[in-house]
Amino acid sequence: MSRTTSFDVAVVGAGVVGAATALALAREGLRVVLVEGREPPSWDAATPDLRVYAFAPDNAALLDRLGVWSAIESARSQPYRCMRVWDAAGGGELAFDADRLGRLELGWIVENALLVDRLWKALPAAGVTILCPDRVQEFSQDDSGASVGLESGTRLRARLVVAADGAESQLRQLARIDAPTRDYGQRGLVAFVEHERPHQSTCWQRFLPTGPLAFLPFTPAAEGRHRSSIVWTLPETEAERMAALDDSAFLGELDRAFDGPLGPLLAVSRRAAFPLRRQLASTQRQGRLVLVGDAAHVVHPLAGQGVNLGLRDVAALQQALGADGGVGDPGAPARLQRWARARKSESAVAAGTFEALNAAFSNDLLAPTLLRGHLLGLAGRMSMLTRALWRRAAGL
């Protein structure tokens, strides 16, 4: 490459959302360059990635349109057909069932590393130029385009720049876009757990005073042993204590906390914990720069909507830029203003909703404790409400 190269779109950050953005816009006939600071994680079928997503139907449809979903689904994905949500203090249950909703499945549990691997494999054939490893050092823009200076000395000129470089987005910081953060003082502890009984293709979530505990169905372990992925929201000090326990002690604590229908817990994988926070950029568009995924919005993981929100940014951006067959200026304000307003609104509503749910259910105050289980049960008995809640979560 020459020291200065021009493209229609420069995407910075090549995780799930960034790689999907590059692929989606290349499919619209745009010349796309993708910049990433490090090689993507390798996917190993023998060692599942601890980071998994509850993948929604609209985003599976997006990846299907991009030509990668079948490769993901055939490699390893676990459909889930039911969701069960209840409170440790008692009361009723909120349940979602695929049969009652007229679906074959409600969604899929998919590993982050597998998604990235299959997206990356599709990029060269789509004509995407990949610069990796390389990092952004400079950013500037004017009425006609934007310039991105990289550590390697390469300078990119693009009519549109997409920041998909995560919660600590360098591009967002260079553009001086505020992203107020609220630290929840919690960590999400993740692991794989083997258990005696089948998971029934069901996502189980129990609300505890310390935070929600989710068991997500996963493909069988060695010799067909039943296995689930867990996401356990805990106060920071408690998460550190749990992470330090030996496997036997940890399984004992987890078994008591879950008190669920999967029988005795038999084995646990390595564990990891990550801090939980809310972070919303003040805008998702500044001139010819747009923010997608965690660069724009970080939300509480209790509803599994983080990557789903990010991929909805991508689907909407593809639609906005492809409305006229991909011709014209992809960074023109008229093409991006409506997209930015709509995406900012959805992410703000989602972040506020998840935060309110976490606050209401993650405490042992008397009034919320007496009410919340009964409210879940009431919602579960209202079929129209249940259907509406699921359709929103599914992006339909």
Image (cartoon, rainbow, N blue to C red):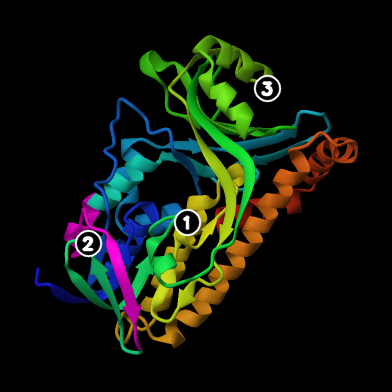
Q: Which residue does the image show at 65% across and 44% down from the upper left?
A: 100
Report the residue marked by disc 3.
257
Whole-angstrom CA distance, mark 2 to mark 3, is: 48 Å
Let me know if residue 302 is in the magenta part: no
Name the disc covering residue 151, or none: 2
Q: Quadrant of residue 155?
A: bottom left
Q: Which residue is the extreme one toward the bottom?
A: 143
Q: Which residue does the image show at 40% across and 59% down from the upper left?
A: 62
Q: Residues within 10 Å of mark 3 (few under 14, many from 20)?
A: some
Q: Nearer the viewer, mark 1 or mark 3?
A: 1
Q: Earlier in the sequence, mark 1 or mark 2?
A: 2
The disc labelled 3 sits on which kind of residue?
Ala
Q: Which residue does the image show at 61% across and 13% down from the upper left?
A: 252
Report the residue marked by disc 1.
294
Q: Look at the image and tell me whether residue 18 can be seen.
A: yes
As helix, strand or loop, the secondary structure at mark 3 comes to helix
As helix, strand or loop, the secondary structure at mark 1 comes to helix
Give how far across and how far down residue 49 sits, in percent.
Answer: 38, 33
Q: Which residue is the extreme one toward the left?
A: 2
